[in-house]
Image (tube, rainbow, N blue to C red):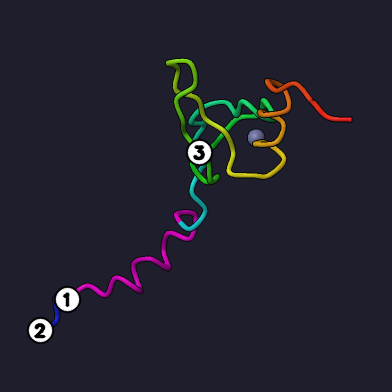
Amino acid sequence: MGNIENPMVLDSHWPHLEQPEPKVIGECVGCQEDIVNLDAWLELMVDGEEIMIHQDVDCTYQFIADRAVCKGE
Ligand SMILES: [Zn+2]
């Protein structure tokens, strides 16, 4: 005994570790903004190319709307 380190105590000495630095993973094909590792995103193959898009209704809609032709009366 006497030499056991308490991880809870050690963590309190490094509060900055609780706020990880966002890291850019790629660019969203919907909103054209950066995708960072803290976001939720989707990856899919389109025309043989792997694309990334935020897991967000606005981004996915924008992506479809840019490529699709609106039909109907
Ligand atoms: Zn987006």
55, above or below 3, in the image:
above
* Magenta span: 5-17
Name the residue located 58 percent from the left edge and 44 percent from the top edge.
55
Secondary structure, mark 2, is loop
Q: Quadrant of residue 33?
A: top right
Please tell me which residue lies in front, 36 or 53.
Answer: 53
Observer-side mark, 3 or 2, equals 3
Secondary structure, mark 1, is loop
| Left or right: 52 as drawn, with respect to 7 | right
4, above or below 16, in the image:
below
Residue at the spot of label 3: 42
The number of numbered badges drawn on the structure is 3
- Rendered location of residue 37, percent (x, y): 48, 41
Q: Quadrant of residue 66?
A: top right
Residue at the spot of label 1: 4
Q: Residues within 10 Å of mark 3 (few under 14, many from 20)?
A: few
> Mark 2 to mark 1: distance in Å?
7 Å
Secondary structure, mark 3, is strand
Q: Quadrant of residue 60?
A: top right
Under mark 2, the amino acid is Met
